[in-house]
């Protein structure tokens, strides 16, 4: 069965510093991987996805994610954090055959001024 | 602007009562989804529909029902059989079938028990 782990409930970073939000996955076959962001009392917004090809995927709002097959990881990164990046971030994986999308439990990112 | 509209934003349910959450999209998407979000948990799939007049159970369908009579609309009914309905409910849609497409989400309905 496929699964996603976001090992950190919360990540704290100072504005202007680089940020990383971690995600590891377990799936049979080749994965499709997604990152979504959720602001308070709002729905999720799509940030980026990995299908195949380059291991570094660029997405919205300056975010990027690095796919590492050997470590089964898909960490979200941004070179310089903004206070407005503070939100809840979800990693999700789809297995081959596209039968199911599984979300991680989310990581709260807090960027301090 | 294209998007997904969920209503109401807040909903209160009395014991033994069925309530219906509305979800409308004008993105011309084929697939629509209902998720439940509880604090500290990821999203859990309740039902999904990939085509009009057809829908499939997700992981936690018990106590819920849906219909898909129109492409734009996918209402969710929380029945009295759902003993713990308090949660944030999110509707989503995507182009094409299968879960490999990015999903677009509405802003949710927060359901509480009176």
Image (tube, coloured by chain):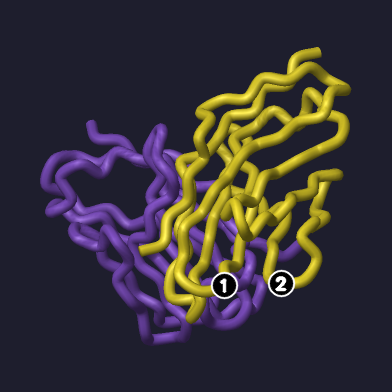
Q: Chain of mark 2?
A: A
Q: Position of residue B94 (x, y in %)?
A: 59, 71
Q: Residue at x 50, y 35 (%)?
A: A7
Q: Position of residue A25 (x, y in %)?
A: 51, 54
Mark 2 or mark 1, earlier in chain: 1
| Drawn side of residue A75 relative to residue B79, left or right | right
| Vertical position of residue A109 compared to residue B74: above or below | above
Q: How many other residues sit within 10 Å of disc 2, few (<14), some (14-19) or many (≥20)?
A: few
Residue matched to label 1: A30
Q: Determine contact: label 2, label 1, CB under 8 Å.
A: yes
| Vertical position of residue B61 compared to residue A90: above or below | below
Q: Residue at x 34, y 75 (%)?
A: B67
Which residue is more in the foreground, A27 or B107?
Answer: A27
| Image quadrant in which you'd find residue B13 | top left
Q: How many marks?
A: 2
Residue matched to label 2: A52
Which residue is more in the foreground, A12 or A74?
Answer: A74
Q: Which chain is purple?
A: B
Which residue is more in the foreground, A66 or A113?
Answer: A66
Q: How many other residues sit within 10 Å of disc 1, few (<14), some (14-19) or many (≥20)?
A: few
Q: Residue at x 43, y 75 (%)?
A: A99
Q: Position of residue A88 (x, y in %)?
A: 59, 35
Q: Which chain is yellow?
A: A
In three-dimensional space, the C-alpha distance between marks 2 and 1, rounded to whole angstroms, equals 9 Å
| Drawn side of residue A6 relative to residue B89, left or right | right
Q: Residue at x 86, y 35 (%)?
A: A79
| Drawn side of residue B85 relative to residue A5, left or right | left
> In which quadrant is the C terminus of chain A drawn?
top right
């Amino acid at each position: 069965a496929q699964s996603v782990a976001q090992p950190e409930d919360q990540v704290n970073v100072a504005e202007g510093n680089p940020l990383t939000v971690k995600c590891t996955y377990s799936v049979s076959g080749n994965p499709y991987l997604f990152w979504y962001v959720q602001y308070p009392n709002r729905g999720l917004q799509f940030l980026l996805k990995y299908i195949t090809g380059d291991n570094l995927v660029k997405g919205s709002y300056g975010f990027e994610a690095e796919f590492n097959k050997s470590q089964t990881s898909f960490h979200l990164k941004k070179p310089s954090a903004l206070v407005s990046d503070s939100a809840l971030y979800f990693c999700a994986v789809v297995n081959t055959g596209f039968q199911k999308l599984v979300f991680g439990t989310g990581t709260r990112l807090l960027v301090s001024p | 602007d294209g998007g997904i509209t969920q209503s109401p934003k807040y909903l209160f349910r009395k014991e033994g009562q069925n309530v219906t959450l509305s979800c409308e999209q004008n993105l011309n998407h084929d697939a629509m989804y209902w998720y439940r979000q509880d604090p500290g948990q990821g999203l859990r799939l309740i039902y999904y529909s990939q085509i009009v007049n057809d829908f499939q159970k997700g992981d936690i369908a018990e106590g819920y029902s849906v219909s898909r009579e129109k492409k734009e609309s996918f209402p969710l009914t929380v029945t009295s059989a759902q003993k713990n309905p308090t949660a944030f409910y999110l509707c989503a849609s995507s182009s094409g079938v299968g879960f490999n497409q990015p999903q677009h989400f509405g802003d949710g309905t927060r359901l509480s028990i009176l």
